[in-house]
Image: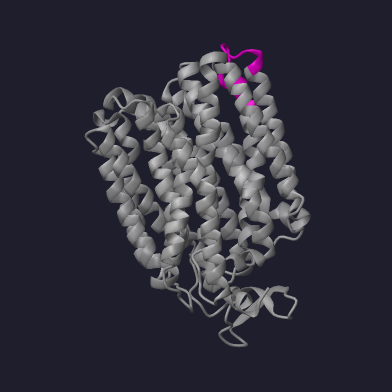
Amino acid sequence: MTETQISTIRTRTPAPDAAKTTGTKSAGGKTIGRTHTSSGPALSPLGLFTVLLGAALPLIDFFIVNVALPTMDHDLHAGPAVLELVVAGYGVAYAVLLVLGGRLGDTFGRRRLFLAGMAAFGLTSLACGLAPDAWSLVGARVAQGASAALMLPQVLATIHSSTSGTRRARALSMYGATAGLSMVAGQILGGVLVAADIAGTGWRAVFLVNVPVAVIGLILAVRTVPETRSERPAPVDVPGTVLLALSLITLMVPLTEGRAAGWPLWTWLTLGAFPLVAAAFYVVERRADRAGRTPLLPPSLFALNGLRRGLPMVVPFSIGFGGFMFVIAVALQQGLRYGPVEAGLALAPMATTFFVASLMGPRLVGRYGSRVVTAGGLIQAVGIAVLMLAVWRDWQGLSLAGLLPGVALAGFGQGLQLPVLIRIVLADVPNDRAGVGSGVMVTTQQSALALGVATLGTLFLSLEPSMGMGDALVITLAAQLAAIALTLLLSLRLPRAVA
């Protein structure tokens, strides 16, 4: 690693008595690590609750529409291709702009960007809820995803820059628990709201419910969230931002829309362009990094051990998670004719066990380190295998009780993995790169969630006409089991000690 690369990710220590720097030594004797600043603004418990509320909203809204899609289709006469855009438009805009949102928070202030993102999220949610037709809903969902990308990176960056030691570890564990619970709770809440049909709003309630929550979040944030920013803010990397956006669009849009559109020529051309654009993005970012500039996604950031070893595991974990949540919602509603409430409640055991495991995680990590992640992967694999067996033995007669053991075990295993994994990835990121580090983490997670919907969802929907819903679900769960096997292998490379 060059001296320029080291300086890119090294934190400037304010004063000898103001901070304690920890990390690993490079070959040149420089410390690559993080700085805990005791003199900076502290995040209060209410402030932590507020930023976690901001973290929950975007993740809930990625999944909340899954159980509402049938009623959207009925009311708006949308068709499968447009319905998939309702999901993908949000996910792509969200993933494309997350790193930029983190960079803007580093430069202009994370509290300021959090407030702007929360306000925009409330307004775009209102636009979704009032959309008169399907294409208006797609446009509003894209804008909602962009708003989420302004807000969410500030959450991890604020936690990282305004806490230290055990308080940071506890806050990151709570963030991981919030993230996992939000993904599951989104579908449960969506089912309840659609079935309740509050004041005749039907599916619109899944978006309108965000408006009062966003107002409450704004009021709390003004009073409780401290302002933080990078000591060395960097200008926006325009070429990197454009190339990252093109990379994600050329990958996710054709995968999401290809099946419903009949795989026309443009989908194959777009997919073929993806590796070329991704390679151009890497070259541009590496050149900027070596020249001493601060690119959108600094390749030198991957010199940090936790990020280099932990981030690759986020990809298969999130692909499996996102694909499972989409597929199970479709299978239960269209295959077993569950109502939206039943389809949502089928995942309640997963949410409960995830929450329990996430509470146990910090104590277990203190004793067993990152092997907790490996154990969680094994438990998740057993849960998916149990669910596969239940579906294979009696698909048509499958009840909520029959689903319970599999989803409960899978949720417990996921709860042992995700919060710890987030801690590992961000452990060594310096404070003045908190926005970039959190943007990289959340972009990877969000892109993989959307990729899971696109790949496992496409696999399931492609197999269903010829094999039937039950057998297609078994094959899709087997594909998720393969992703879990990959996470298990990658977990063996994680640093044993967890900061």
Q: Is residue 216 above or below residue 460?
A: below
Q: Residue at x 43, y 26 (%)?
A: 262
Residue 403 sits inside the magenta stretch: yes
Q: Is residue 89 above or below residue 17?
A: above
Residue 125 spot, x, y in % from top left? 31, 45
Q: Would residue 125 be found to the left or right of residue 17 on screen?
A: left
Residue 452 spot, x, y in % from top left? 54, 38
Give the number of marks.
0
Residue 64 visible within the image? no
Residue 192 sits inside the magenta stretch: no
Q: Residue at x 61, y 68 (%)?
A: 300
Q: Considering the whole magenta stretch, tell me its main secondary structure.
A: helix
Quadrant of the rendering where the C terminus is positioned:
bottom right
Residue 339 spot, x, y in % from top left? 43, 21
Residue 386 spot, x, y in % from top left? 69, 25
Asked where in the image residue 98 lies, by quadrant, the reply is bottom left
Q: Is residue 55 above or below residue 158?
A: above
Asked where in the image residue 114 lies, by quadrant, the reply is bottom left
Q: Residue at x 30, y 34 (%)?
A: 204
- In the image, the segment drawn in magenta is 392-406
Residue placed farthest to the left in the image?
A: 132
Q: Residue at x 59, y 14 (%)?
A: 395
Residue 120 visible within the image? yes
Along the viewing direction, whichever of 318 and 209 lies nearer the viewer: 318
Q: Would residue 225 be found to the left or right of residue 359 on screen?
A: left
